[in-house]
Structures are given as structure tokens and as C-alpha cells.
Image (cartoon, rainbow, N blue to C red):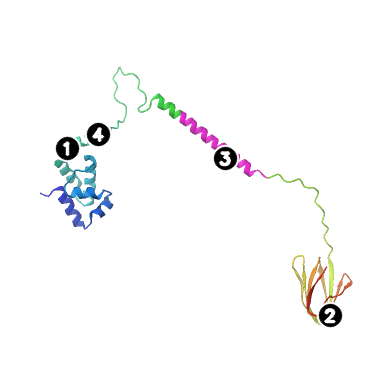
Amino acid sequence: MQTIGERLEEARKRKGISIREAAESTKIRGDYLQKFEANSFEVDLPPLYVRGFLRSYARYLDLDPDRVVSDFDALVGRETRPARRENREAYGRVDFGEPARGPEAGPTAPAGRSDQDQALMLKYGLLAGAAVVALVVIILLINVLFTRSPAKPAQGPTPIVQAEAAQTLTLTAIDATRVKVVQDLDGAVLFNGSLAKAESKSIKKQGKLLITVEAGKNLRMEVNGRNYAVPIDGYGRFALD
């Protein structure tokens, strides 16, 4: 009859997987699996954990986990239920509910909590509440400080700026020439073109003008009827205030 280890090893090899692959899939240490397949269960674990590992490993290898655990119990000479009770006693027992009280037993404090524990819990609860309140107050103060609109400086009466009166520039070609007029205030091109002989062009201006002329000697300028001399004879650029 095959041992537990022989059945585990045969099933693993039949699936074509290694100890390392089985350990990664089952999350059981590889050295434990090697000992199980060697039919050696002397590992530093309580029997309860050994049963759980054997059940998981058998299920992973498509073996009957109950039969494997039953054979393990028979091998170690213990029954499943007493072994589990012994393991729980060794590692501590958790009682659910209150112990039975006789008729003469007095009132019992809530399980697991003494008067001192309740006082500590109340103290920590008050401290936590105070910390939350303080945090809320700090956040509100920060919001008030950083969202307050800055005070506007006192302003005197707004000075009245009088707009410069528009002037009319009249360009007259003594002979054919080309002219470009740019308003220095905003860079607007007021005129850019050719003037035939005796042709005139009137332009509304504000402030200084930058005038480029192809032949200055062929151009005559007037501002509101007042003559202005062209400072160049040939091609060039000049300013007119």
C-alpha cells in the first residue's frame, strides 16, 4: 500500500510540475512539501497546520483531501477532533459569550472590559474629539486669513486725461512716389500705397507718425493746413510729431 508521501509525489509528477511550482501555487513552503512527499511530518508546526497544508496540497494534486488527512491521523495515532482541541488549548482559547453563573453569583462586568478600561476608553475618546475640534478651528482660521480680500488703498480723485485732438495729415505727390504711414502709438498702418502725380491723401492721426517715402523730394505734407517740410530727398524714413 502506498504511503501518503508516495501518493503525493506520484500525483505531482503525473501533473508534470516541480516542488517549486507547487509551492508557488499553494503558498506552502517547498521544504514542507519535500518532507510531506518523503512521508516525514516532523516539521515545526502544530498538527492542525500540518493537516491544513496536507488538505490544500492534496486538493491541488487532485487527490481526495479527506482521505489524505485521515491517513495522516492514523499515522500519528491521533483522532482528528481531540487533536484540534489540544491545539486550541495550547495556543489559547477564545470564549464566546458569558460563563454560566449560579444563582448566588453577583453581577458580572462586561466581558473583557474592566472599569479601568472603560475609563481609559472614555479619556482617549475625549482627547480624540478635542483634537478634531482643534483641527477644524485651525482650518477655518486658515481659510479666513487667506481668503480675506486685501484692503484697497485709498484713491484720490481720478485725474482727467484729455485726449489729444485728432489731426489731419494731407500728403500730396509733386511727382509719383510711394508712401507708408504708421501710427507710433499703436503700430497701426494708416496708409501704404502709391501716389500718382498731383494725387493727395488725407489721414487722421493721433500723436507721432513714422513715415517711409520712396522719393522724399516728390512729397509735400500738411497738418491741419500747415505745411511741413519732408526732411529727406530720396528713399528713407522719418518721424512726424
- State which region is magenta: 123-149
Amino acid type of the residue that numbered disc 3 sits on in the rendered structure: Ile
Q: CA gap, disc 3 to disc 1? A: 64 Å
**Residue 31 in sight here:** yes
Q: State whether residue 141 is above or below residue 57.
A: above
Q: In this view, does 149 lie to the left or right of 164?
A: left
Question: Which residue is denoted by mark 4 in the rendering?
Answer: 90
Mark 4, mark 3: which one is toward the viewer?
A: 4
Closer to the N terminus: mark 4 or mark 1? 1
Closer to the N terminus: mark 4 or mark 3? 4
Closer to the N terminus: mark 2 or mark 1? 1
Closer to the N terminus: mark 3 or mark 1? 1
Q: Which residue is located at x 84 percent, y 69 percent?
A: 168
* SS assignment for the magenta stretch, majority: helix
Question: Which residue is denoted by mark 3 in the rendering?
Answer: 139
Q: State whether residue 110 is above or below residue 59.
A: above
Whether the magenta-drawn stretch holds residue 126 is answered as yes
Mark 4, mark 1: which one is toward the viewer?
A: 4
Question: Which residue is denoted by mark 2 in the rendering?
Answer: 217
Closer to the N terminus: mark 2 or mark 3? 3
Question: Which residue is denoted by mark 1 in the rendering?
Answer: 79
Q: In this view, does 135 lie to the left or right of 162?
A: left
Q: Label 2: how many residues lie within 10 Å, few (<14), some (14-19) or many (20+)?
A: some
Mark 3, mark 1: which one is toward the viewer?
A: 3
Where does the image place residue 70, in percent across and percent down from the top left?
A: 16, 43
